[in-house]
Amino acid sequence: MNVHFQLASERDLLRLLELMRELYQHEAMNFDEEVARSALKKTLLDSTLGSAYLILLDEQPAGYFVLTFCFSLEFHGKFALLDEIYVRKALRKQKMGTKVIEFVEGICKKMGIKALRLEVGEENQAAQSLYGATGFQKDPRYLFTKWL
């Protein structure tokens, strides 16, 4: 079984949207294809915003992840957000999530980024276990969002 990560480009847009739809359905989140398409295109066309990767298992799509960049004094400048990570249900528990995190950490280290963040639903115990096992710590502050 050969797992590797492929930097996505515009030609991968439909495949990414399919995987996004699966993730949003799994997480019971609202999926708006046009909004998702627009956001993905921005990320695919501007590497300063971040990048999207396909997770390939024997050249077949097993999932995807998106790494984006932010800036914070608290995190010593530029930090990374593992914005979305998804592995198809039938392929979980094969250490792909761990491999994704190791790969992302390598990218961050090469860029001089000191902090990698992510968010996870309270009910997603499997993901929380993965993140804890790979060194993430639950932030003691709450994350708030206001849509504008």
Image: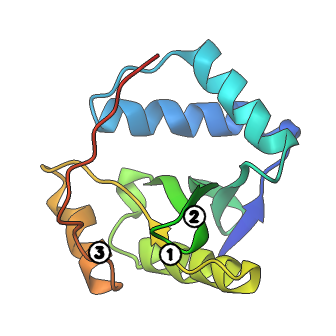
Task: Give me the disc on residue 130.
Answer: 3
Q: Which mark is residue 27?
A: none
* Comparing labels 3 and 1, the label whose residue is closer to the camera: 1
Q: Are marks 3 and 2 in contact (CB under 8 Å)?
A: no
Quadrant for residue 31, please give it. Answer: top left
The crowding category of the residue bearing disc 3, from other C-alpha atoms within 10 Å (few below 14, some 14 to 19, many at least 20), is some
- Decide if residue 2 is in sight here: no
**Disc sitting over residue 80 in the figure:** 2
137 vs 53, left or right, is left
Q: CA distance from mark 1 to mark 2?
A: 6 Å
Q: CA distance from mark 3 to mark 2?
A: 18 Å
Question: What residue is drawn where x is 82% and y is 53%?
Answer: 47
Residue 116 position within the rendered picture, expressed as x and y whole percent measured from the top left: 49, 71
Name which residue type carries label 1. Ala
The image's colouring method is rainbow
Q: How many marks?
A: 3
Residue at which label 1 appears: 115
Coordinates of residue 101 in the picture (x, y in percent): 50, 76
Q: Dot 1: few (<14), some (14–19), or many (≥20) neighbours within 10 Å?
A: some
Circle 1 SS class: loop
Residue under the point 87% across and 40% down: 45
Distance between the alpha carbons at the discs numbered 3 and 1: 18 Å
Task: Using the rendered view, name the quadrant where residue 14 is placed.
Answer: top right
Tell me: residue 98, above or below residue 62.
below
Q: Are marks 3 and 1 in contact (CB under 8 Å)?
A: no
Closer to us: 106 or 13: 106
Residue drawn at x 22%, y 48% as measured from the top left: 121
- Indicate which disc, 3 or 2, sits on the residue closer to the N terminus: 2
The amino acid pointed to by label 2 is Ala
Secondary structure category for the residue under label 2: strand
